[in-house]
């Protein structure tokens, strides 16, 4: 098969690494990719949201399947674009339809979907500029902390958790009346605050059946002990110690099955990954959010734990035969730690030369934000490298990753040294 993979982060490097191991692969292209993905295929310089370029390359290169990494092209409707084009119709896209991607693209859509299917999630109400007064009253009648969510995509920044009522009211006003998050905050979901520990669960579905992937936990805050600003993710572990069989049974029965069935019954085409952002409230799972793609950096531990041929699974998705495919995992733990640019998630510099990647032999170095300058690898983003290791347990995997990180340097490099602190 000839595969085109869309995206450029650590998630896409991990997918490229896995796809390159498939016995079914003839050629892999990544658009736009990064300095790491070029080791597994050919990088193509166009944006995943530039559908015309996607089409041109798919036709010119006789691509057999398109695998979509990030959410933007999905929310913009790349799946439907392919189906609606006579020249592209036969090329399967791994990723949901535009309507299915609304599970991530609209918090209000996701909440309504969950309430139709009795899927456990925080209680909520949705407001617009026209109903701002009701929204302010709603806040006044609830207890804090107040959870305010911009309805649309806001690059991971659209969720505010606020202690004080007055501040919550002023933020609600600025989201609805002053477009704090642009169009994304034309609607705002206000939610009950849930207390618990979070984890990420992933399935791959062909719209009929699904395969569960290993669960993972990511670390979102920049500072140790989960302090400081939110980031795109500072590292991840898999498995998650508290996700035992009893808990995962509840996740399966109360959340995954009703979600996949709900999509099918509502005739929402969905052939791709579903990411369940869950919270464990005293042993019971609740959905915090859905995403229509794999997580980053969770993918950098989940995909290395997958033993099966990923293209066999994708072919199962494309041909509605996923239930006939086997899925197997390595019985090892995996941990990844993100090396980021100094200053991230605020202002940071790019273009720093990275040294030592090739001296890492015991871990897998996934590139998240890198570019190349001849043989040199340069920093090109806030999150730069995701260093993944296997271990007989999480402690062993983390120790290996920290040993490997010690061999890599670039100007201003920062990483968290406390991964797993809350669950180990
Ligand atoms: P989201 O973008 O929906 O994942 O929200 C970002 C983060 O806000 C989540 O990872 C949680 O840590 C937190 N969060 C979101 N919703 C809630 C909630 N209802 N209760 C407590 N924390 C929440
Ligand atoms: N790690 C969280 C996300 O990918 O959205």
Image: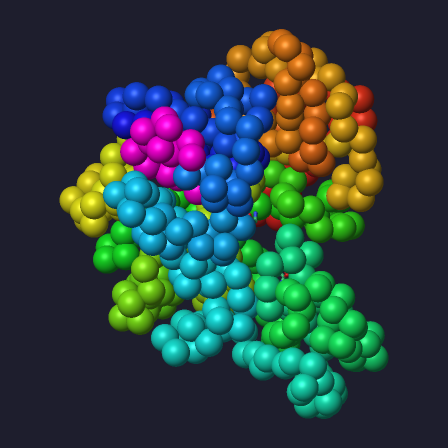
Relative to 128, is 56 on the left or the right? left
Q: Is residue 365 visible?
A: no
Give the magenta part as a residue range: 56-71
For this orientation, the residue located farthest to the left is: 324
Q: Is residue 291 magenta?
A: no
Rendering quarter of residue 22: top left
Q: Residue at x 47, y 29 (%)?
A: 30
Q: Is residue 371 above or below residue 147?
A: above
Q: Residue at x 31, y 71 (%)?
A: 266
Q: Is residue 57 magenta?
A: yes
Give the total number of marks visible in the rendering.
Answer: 0
Q: Residue at x 26, y 22 (%)?
A: 23
Q: Is residue 51 above or below residue 392?
A: below
Relative depth, front residue between 113 and 71: 71
Relative depth, front residue between 200 and 314: 314
Relative depth, front residue between 80 and 397: 80
Q: Residue at x 47, y 63 (%)?
A: 102
Rendering quarter of residue 148: bottom right
Rendering quarter of residue 354: top right
Quadrant of the drawing holding the N terminus: top left
Relative to 412, is 55 on the left or the right? left
Quadrant of the drawing holding the C terminus: top right
Q: Is residue 13 above or below residue 298?
A: above
Q: Is residue 51 visible?
A: yes
Q: Is residue 278 above or below residue 413?
A: below
Residue 132 position within the rendered picture, expressed as x and y whole percent measured from the top left: 71, 85
Relative to 72, is 88 on the left or the right? left
Residue 56 position within the rendered picture, expressed as x and y whole percent measured from the top left: 42, 35
Relative depth, front residue between 381 and 418: 381
Residue 340 position within the rendered picture, expressed as x and y whole percent measured from the top left: 71, 33
Residue 16 position within the rendered picture, expressed as x and y whole percent measured from the top left: 44, 28
């Amino acid at each position: 098969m000839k595969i085109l993979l869309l995206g450029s982060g650590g998630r896409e490097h991990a997918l490229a690494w896995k796809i390159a191991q498939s016995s079914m692969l003839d050629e892999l292209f990544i658009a736009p990719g990064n300095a790491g993905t070029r080791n597994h295929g050919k990088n193509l310089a166009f944006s995943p949201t530039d559908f015309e370029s996607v089409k041109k390359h798919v036709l010119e290169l006789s691509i057999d399947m398109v695998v979509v990494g990030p959410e933007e092209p999905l929310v913009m409707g790349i799946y439907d674009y392919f189906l609606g084009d006579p020249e592209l119709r036969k090329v399967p896209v791994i990723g949901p339809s535009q309507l299915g991607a609304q599970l991530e693209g609209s918090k209000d859509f996701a909440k309504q979907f969950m309430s139709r299917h009795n899927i456990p999630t925080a209680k909520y109400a949705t407001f617009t500029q026209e109903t701002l007064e009701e929204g302010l009253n709603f806040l006044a009648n609830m207890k804090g902390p107040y959870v305010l969510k911009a309805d649309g995509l806001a690059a991971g920044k659209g969720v505010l958790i606020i202690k004080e009522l007055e501040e919550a009211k002023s933020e609600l006003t600025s989201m609805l009346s002053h477009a704090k998050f642009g169009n994304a905050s034309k609607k705002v979901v206000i939610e009950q605050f849930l207390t618990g520990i979070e984890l990420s669960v992933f399935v791959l579905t062909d719209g009929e059946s699904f395969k569960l992937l290993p669960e993972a936990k990511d670390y979102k805050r920049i500072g140790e002990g989960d302090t400081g600003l939110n980031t795109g993710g500072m590292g991840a572990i898999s498995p998650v110690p508290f996700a035992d069989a009893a808990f995962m049974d509840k996740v399966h029965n109360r959340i995954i099955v009703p979600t996949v069935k709900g999509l099918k019954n509502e005739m929402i085409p969905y052939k791709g990954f579903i990411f369940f952002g869950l919270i464990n409230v005293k042993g019971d799972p609740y959905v915090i959010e859905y995403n229509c793609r794999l997580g980053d950096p969770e993918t950098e531990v989940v995909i290395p734990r997958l033993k099966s041929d990923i293209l066999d699974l994708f072919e199962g998705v494309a041909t509605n035969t996923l239930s006939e495919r086997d899925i197997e995992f390595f019985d090892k733990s995996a941990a990844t730690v993100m090396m980021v640019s100094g200053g991230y998630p605020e202002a940071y510099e790019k273009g720093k030369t990275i040294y030592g990647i090739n001296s890492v032999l015991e871990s897998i170095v996934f590139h998240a934000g890198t570019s190349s300058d001849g043989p040199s690898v340069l920093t090109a983003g806030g999150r730069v490298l995701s260093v993944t290791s296997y271990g007989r347990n999480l402690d062993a995997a983390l120790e290996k990753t920290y040993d490997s990180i010690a061999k890599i340097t670039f100007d201003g490099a920062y990483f968290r040294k406390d991964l797993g602190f809350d669950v180990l």
